[in-house]
Structures are given as C-alpha cells and as structure tokens.
Amino acid sequence: MSDKQYYKLVATFDGPKDAVLQVAFSSLGAYVAATGYKGVDVWNMSTQTTVTIDIPDADLNQAYTTCTWLYFTKACRHVLILGRIDGAVLAWDLNVVDGKEVLRSVRPPAPNTPTIGHEGAVISLDVGSADILEGRRGRVAASFMDKSIIVWAMSPNGGFKLLWKSEEITYVPKVVRFSGERKVWVFATTGGTITTLHSEKGTVSLVQNSGLELVTAVAVDPENDCFAVGIGGRGFELWSLGALEKTRRFVDPIDPNVFFPKQVVFTEDGEGVLTGTDHGCGILYDLLVVAATTTGDCNYVAIAGSVAQQPNQVLVWQKIQPSTPNLEDTYDTKKFYILRIPRGMAKLVVVIATLAIAVLSVAFYRPFENTDMPQFGPLVHGLLDGVGLTREKHVSGDDIRQQSPLSSTPRSDPAWQADQVLSFGSSRELVDRVPMRIERENAHPSKDADSSIVDVGKRRVTRQEEVWIIGDE
C-alpha cells in the first residue's frame, strides 16, 4: 500500500517536561493523552488545545508509566485510566466546567493493588472495549512488577470493582491484553512464556512458550488472529495468535543507538504496524500485499519523544482515505424524496402489512361457493359511487346462475363424485430491502500504545438505527 506515505502532520503538542512513556487516543479520537516521568498531559484533537487537569501537584507530578481510555456512550463520558510507578491505578473523568474541559479525580483508586512501592509498579494497562454501551460495564486489566494480574469492572458512575486477582504468574508480565470476550493474554518480558487467562474468572487456561528471548512491546489483533511483538531495537516479529507460530520478521532499517523498549501498534485495521525508534521518528511497516476495501476512514498516528530529563513533544499525523458519497449526495437521488422513520416502526409496519395481506388472501381465495358474493357487489359499487367513479349495472349472483347454461352447481353435478377441496398457498411475505444510512464518526483508536512513543486512531463506519424509504416526487 504505497499510499501509507501520505500521512500529514496535523498537530504538534508541547507540554511533557520529561520522557513520555505512553501515548493513547481516546474513543472517537477526541483526545490524546501522554504519560511519563513528569506527569500527564491531555489535548483536545479538534481544537488542539490543552485540557485542564484539576489534580494536586503532588499527585500530578509523579511518574505515570501507562494509560488508556474508556468512553461511556450513554453518559457521553471519557475516563482516563492511569497506572503509576508506585503501583496505583487511577481514573480521571473528563467534564465540562464553566465552558472548559477539565480532568478530575472523582473515583477512588483501584483496590487490591500492590503496596510495596516501585516493586509493584504498573507495567501495562488494557481495556476490554473502549466504548461501553448502556447497561454494560467497562473492564480494566493491569499487570504489575510483582508478577500479579488484576482485572476490575467499572460502571459510568461507580469506581473500580475487583473481578479477580491472579498471582499464579511466575514471570514479570511485560504486557497484558484482552482478546475476544473471555481471554486475557499475558506476555513474559523474557523467556517467551505466554499465558492465557479467563477474563471473567482469572483461571489459567493455557500456558505456551514462544521461544522469544526478549519482549519489549506487544500489539494484539484478534480479528486477524495475530500479534506483533517488539524484540528490542532489532525490529519486530509477526506471530499467529492461535497457532503461536512466527509468520514474518521485520528488521529495523535504522540502527538503534540503545536497545531499550520501543512500542509497537497495529494501524488501519491491521494493514500496517507502527513502531517507535530512538531517532526521533516512527516507522510504518506494510503488512498486506493487497489493500482492504476503502471505507472513507480517517487514520491518525501519534509519536512522542522519550528522551529523559528534557522537554518532549507529541506529534500527530493524519491520513484521510477517499470516501464513498452518501446516498443523498448522488445525482440520481435528486429526483427522489427521502423519508426517515425509525427501524422499529418500519419493522412493525412490515409485520402489520404482511398480516393484512394474509387475511385478505384467505378471505378472497376461499372456495367460491362458500362466499356470499351478493354481499360484496353492492358494497363495491357503493364505494365506487362514493368516489365518483362510473360503474356497470350490478348483476347479482342469482341472476348469473339463472343466465348460465348449466343448471347445476359443481357440487350437484353427477361428474363430481366427491367434495372437491381447493387449497391455496400462504400469502408471500413482503419485505422491502432499503439502503442503510452510513455515517462517519469521529476518529476512533484501534490500540492504545506508547512509542518511542506511538499510538494510532481511526474513524469508524457505523450503521445508524433508521431506514430510508425512497419514492418518486
């Protein structure tokens, strides 16, 4: 995909006073956060302004090792989840106060975290889903330097609720990642061990050894059944998630200055992998020979400086792919009008119409002799007179039989040796297939990640709950 080179720098954010350890886009791409040795910085992507953080300086200026986001769709609330070097896991809510966006700590810290100082530092954070729908709870997983793994649940207005804590891991868990509905993957820093835990119970379901000597960063892509693993400053490898087999190895084209952890993250629905370097840039690798179908998505890439003991910046690039015109924007639809009705109402109308057709079919296709036709003739003619339409003179059923050359009815004719039953098939169900409206939302992150330091975000294509009925003017 040669068009990957067409990323455009759209924002440069100042603020971090020391090395950045993690950058993460919020859901909908509305915000980007950077955490590091000297606190937290958050920016609004649309206005490119700094979000106010209403936190005491004593807490704000600590070392934050990692971060990720939750978004509660019903409450329209962004929550920044943070991990600190002292083992604390925190949640800051983003609210609008007097017209200004403010991050505040309104929820208590996560319970059951290690209390042994730096030996219990938070190494990795992940969420089961960035978007939390109404009636559901968010899930947050954390790995710690003391080899423990903890998973909590969080509601829109509640704090962290412990689901489980596992102390069965015998290695330092470099990365913890949700995969699917009921799996949590844990990757060892050294030794190549990969452990799969049940996401709701915390029980160990599988322990495998990949043979990897060193793991510096991991990005998991469950949809494509693969994960990318950083191998120090030597590049990264692509592995099959299910079979646990190495499929490809990518060598860093830039010789590293030092072999320290650099982040790796999937971009554009798994079409590429972005890695950080210690040369002030990120490298985007092409994974697929043929590009996926273009959906009009907008992709973001964020790269932050990680040089210690000096100010650093966060840079954001954007690539807008060609979009397909909406239905109402095409030339042919100018001749039509569009009526929008809720999907539920449309289904109800279809069901009622189908039942009505079925009833009418039974009424009009009964055996002719069982139908009192003289009742229908005057009624129909009365309706025609009411609307001013001309009609032929009504002839009753009795008059028709008197004029017929056959003096007997079908049932009295000797040729009929037995009653004849006329059967009819059921009425056909009528279901209109109408186009669904497709809209682009704001930018949406695919994976939270640091870089040296990197993260990506993208727009989503969603299906809106409404139906278009199109007719002539």
Image (tube, rainbow, N blue to C red):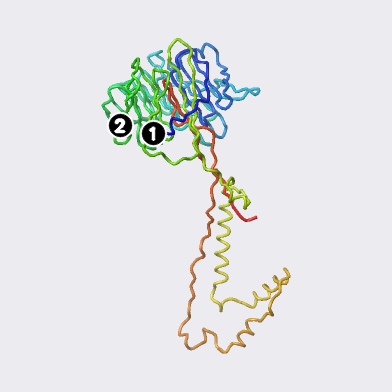
Query: On the image, which quarter does residue 51 sit in?
Result: top right
What amino acid is found at the position of numbered circle 1 in the picture? Answer: Asp
Q: Which residue extends farthest top?
A: 309
Q: Residue at x 53, y 27 (%)?
A: 158
The percent position of residue 443, horizontal first and vertical second, equals 52, 32
Residue 229 on image: x %, y %: 34, 27
Look at the image and tell me whether residue 137 can be seen.
Answer: no
Give the residue at x 49% y 17%.
313
**Where the N terminus falls, by quadrant?**
top left
> Residue 37, position in %: x, y?
45, 14
Q: Is residue 62 above or below residue 249?
A: above
The answer to which of 385 and 396 lies nearer the viewer is 385
Quarter of the image that includes the C terminus: bottom right
Q: Are marks 2 and 1 in contact (CB under 8 Å)?
A: no
| Residue 242 falls left or right of residue 102 | left
User: In what element is the residue under mark 1?
Assistant: strand
Name the residue tied to disc 2. Answer: 248
Query: Residue 221 has which mark?
Result: 1
Along the horizontal axis of the image, is 321 left or right of 333?
left
Residue 376 located left or right of residue 203? right
Residue at screen point 62% across, 77% down: 373
Give residue 392's position: percent from left, percent from top: 68, 78
**What is the secondary structure assignment of the residue under circle 2?**
strand
